Each structure stands twice: as structure tokens, then as C-alpha cells.
Image (cartoon, grey):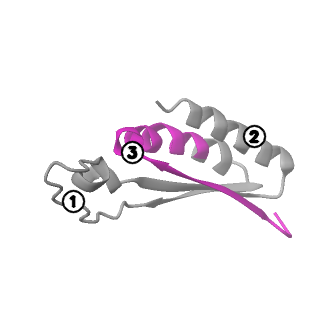
Amino acid sequence: MNGFRNLVYIVIAFTQDIELTIFREIIPYFQTCFNADNDCRFNYLYSYPIVKDKVKETNGANDLASLTDKEYWRINNIRFELTSNAKDINDKFWRDIQTKLSELT
């Protein structure tokens, strides 16, 4: 593929309970669909959650999970990206992203 290549991407945040589904089903699907063609390239970038000690003693007042639960701030995120200059491939990528992410529950 010569010339200008468009990069499109989406970053999603997710909890650990759907992490296996993302790595076992969604990523392999996109790798199979979009890396088999020389006109495009699928890639992902996973960011490990940063664990911060935000737990505070509240003495019963303001027992908000954000203050008392160490796991509250543990949020994973992943970036799915596609490099292509073909509009039909980009359109398929966005349709598939919408379908696959809506199946995560």
C-alpha cells in the first residue's frame, strides 16, 4: 500500500471481569479479519491499571466506595487501532467494533 495511510482508533475502559473475553475473542477476531489483508493493519495497546492507595479511614462517615475500596480505581483500558486507506475497510472496522463491544456484558 503506497501513500497516505489513515489511522483510526478507539480507547475503551473496562473492568477485569471482561478482560479474558477481550483477549480470547475480540482481539483474535480483529487480527484475523484485518491483518490478513495487505491494505490494512489492526493493532492494540493494553494499558495496565495503575493501583493507587486511595483508601481512607472514614469512621463510618462518607463510606463511599471510592474512599474505602482499594479495587475501585483499578480500571483497565485498551486501544484498538486500524491503519488503512480504504473507506470500506474502515467502515467494516467501526461496524465490527460496535457489534463486538455491544456483546460484552
Q: Nearer the viewer, mark 2 or mark 3?
A: 3
For marks 3 and 1 on the same chain, the one whose residue lies earlier in the sequence: 3
Q: Is residue 9 above or below residue 98?
A: below
Q: CA distance from mark 3 to mark 1?
A: 19 Å
Report the residue that reaches farthest toward the bottom. 3
Q: Identity of the amino acid at label 2?
A: Lys
Q: Are marks 2 and 1 in contact (CB under 8 Å)?
A: no
In-front residue for pair 47/53 = 53
Mark 2 lies on residue: 92
Position of 9 with respect to 22 (left or right) is right
In-front residue for pair 64/28 = 64
Q: Residues within 10 Å of mark 2 (few under 14, many from 20)?
A: few
Q: Residues within 10 Å of mark 3 (few under 14, many from 20)?
A: few
Q: State yes or no: residue 16 in magenta.
A: yes
- Give the magenta-colored segment's residue range: 1-30
Position of 44 with respect to 51 (left or right) is right
Q: Are marks 3 and 1 in contact (CB under 8 Å)?
A: no
Mark 3 lies on residue: 15
Label 2: which secondary element: helix
Q: Nearer the viewer, mark 3 or mark 1?
A: 1
Q: CA distance from mark 2 to mark 3?
A: 26 Å
Label 3: which secondary element: loop
Position of 76 with respect to 89 (left or right) is left
In the figure, residue 29 lies in which quadrant? top right
The residue that appears at 83% across and 58% down in the rendered structure is 85
Label 1: which secondary element: loop
Residue 2 in the image, given as x and y percentages of width and height = 84, 68
Q: CA distance from mark 2 to mark 1?
A: 44 Å
Mark 1 lies on residue: 55
